[in-house]
């Protein structure tokens, strides 16, 4: 399961999405996340589904590879569904046993939240799978550059986010190595109840934190050895420049967002009453 996490990993391929400017992908991801929590009706859900399917197709990232990343949040998805299913109060009760009850509104809310979580992970993964950490850093820094006028440390913020994204696959690999080493010594992480497996993961924390701090210290020493002093006066070997395909992508994203907002006004919410 540790290796199933795809957020923060880069999938090399020659696709339209890989060639887009990182600023376009950052803007598109932000817009997609807004639309995921904005749709109400079936029409809006269908539009978002079609849009996501087309983008996944254009990315040339295998669909099974993206779905594999959902296994890491399976427990979170199930808990979200259960809480919304049983804890949504409404007079429209369709099943009841003692203090447990399921309402039509609870079913609707549970379905919406599960879909939103899945689309949230898929949309975020698409950005990191098609963009290298260096490109993300440059795109984020360029996008936030106007904030430098009010003394916001844009370069430092972009650098921290890039380092955090780069560390995700490194720490995943390190966790997997520690788990394999402890399993070779008799540790059991796969059998027993969910609570027992969670307790078995606790011994991983100490060596994982030690490894993370060691890597952070090595990175800091490497940056100091190269006389890193922040973003003042730094130039780019490959400066970002918009191309025709980037402007076309901006237009497609704006039309998609406008379509979702229009359907939000015109569509009826998802209804499970009939």
Image (cartoon, rainbow, N blue to C red):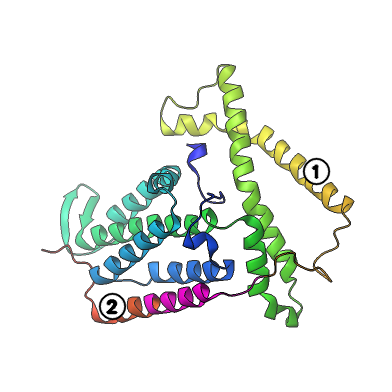
Using the image as rendered, state which of residue 224 and residue 253 is in the foreground: 253
Residue 247 versus residue 73 in the image, above or below:
below
Q: Is residue 48 above or below residue 64?
A: below
User: How packed is label 2: few (under 14 Cα within 10 Å), some, or many (20 or more)?
Assistant: some
Q: Secondary structure at mark 1?
A: helix
- Front-most of residues 253 and 37: 253
Residue at x 22%, y 67% (from the top left corner): 270
Q: Report the predominant secondary structure element of the magenta stretch.
A: helix
**Mark 1 sits on what residue?**
218
Left or right: 216 in relation to 250: right
- Would residue 173 appear left or right of 229 to someone viewing this image? left
Front one among 64 and 2: 64
Q: Quadrant of the C terminus?
A: bottom left
Corner quadrant of residue 136: bottom right
Q: Earlier in the sequence, mark 1 or mark 2?
A: 1
Q: Position of residue 165 (x, y in %)?
A: 62, 53
Which residue is found at the position 65% from the left and 53% from the top? 164
Q: On the image, which quarter does residue 151 sit in?
A: bottom right
Residue 7 picture location, percent across and down: 52, 51
- Kindly report the distance in space between the C-alpha atoms of the residues bearing marks 1 and 2: 51 Å
Q: Is residue 272 magenta?
A: no
Q: How many marks?
A: 2
Q: Quadrant of residue 122?
A: bottom left
The residue sitting at 20% across, 61% down in the picture is 104
Q: Position of residue 267 (x, y in %)?
A: 23, 77
Q: Which residues are magenta?
A: 240-256
Identify the residue under disc 2. 263
């Amino acid at each position: 399961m540790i290796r199933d996490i795809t957020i923060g990993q880069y999938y090399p391929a020659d696709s339209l999405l890989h060639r887009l400017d990182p600023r376009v992908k950052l803007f598109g991801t932000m817009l997609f996340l807004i639309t995921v929590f904005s749709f109400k009706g079936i029409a809006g859900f269908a539009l978002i589904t079609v849009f996501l399917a087309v983008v996944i197709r254009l990315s040339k990232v295998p669909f099974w590879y993206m779905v594999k990343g959902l296994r890491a949040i399976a427990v979170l998805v199930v808990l979200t569904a259960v809480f919304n299913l049983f804890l949504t109060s409404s007079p429209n009760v369709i099943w009841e046993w003692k203090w447990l009850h399921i309402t039509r509104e609870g079913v609707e809310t549970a379905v919406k939240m599960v879909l939103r979580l899945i689309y949230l992970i898929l949309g975020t993964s698409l950005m990191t799978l098609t963009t290298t950490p260096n490109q993300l850093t440059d795109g984020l820094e360029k996008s936030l550059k106007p904030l430098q006028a009010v003394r916001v440390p844009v370069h430092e913020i972009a650098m921290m986010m890039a380092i955090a994204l780069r560390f995700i696959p490194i720490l995943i690999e390190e966790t997997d190595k520690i788990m394999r080493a402890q399993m070779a010594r008799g540790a059991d992480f796969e059998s027993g109840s969910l609570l027992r497996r969670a307790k078995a993961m606790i011994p991983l924390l100490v060596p994982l934190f030690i490894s993370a701090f060691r890597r952070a210290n090595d990175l800091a020493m490497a940056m100091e050895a190269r006389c890193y002093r922040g973003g003042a006066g730094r130039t780019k070997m490959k400066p970002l420049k918009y191309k025709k395909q980037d402007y076309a992508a901006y237009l497609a994203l704006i039309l998609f967002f406008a379509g979702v907002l229009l359907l939000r006004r015109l569509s009826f919410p998802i209804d499970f009453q009939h």
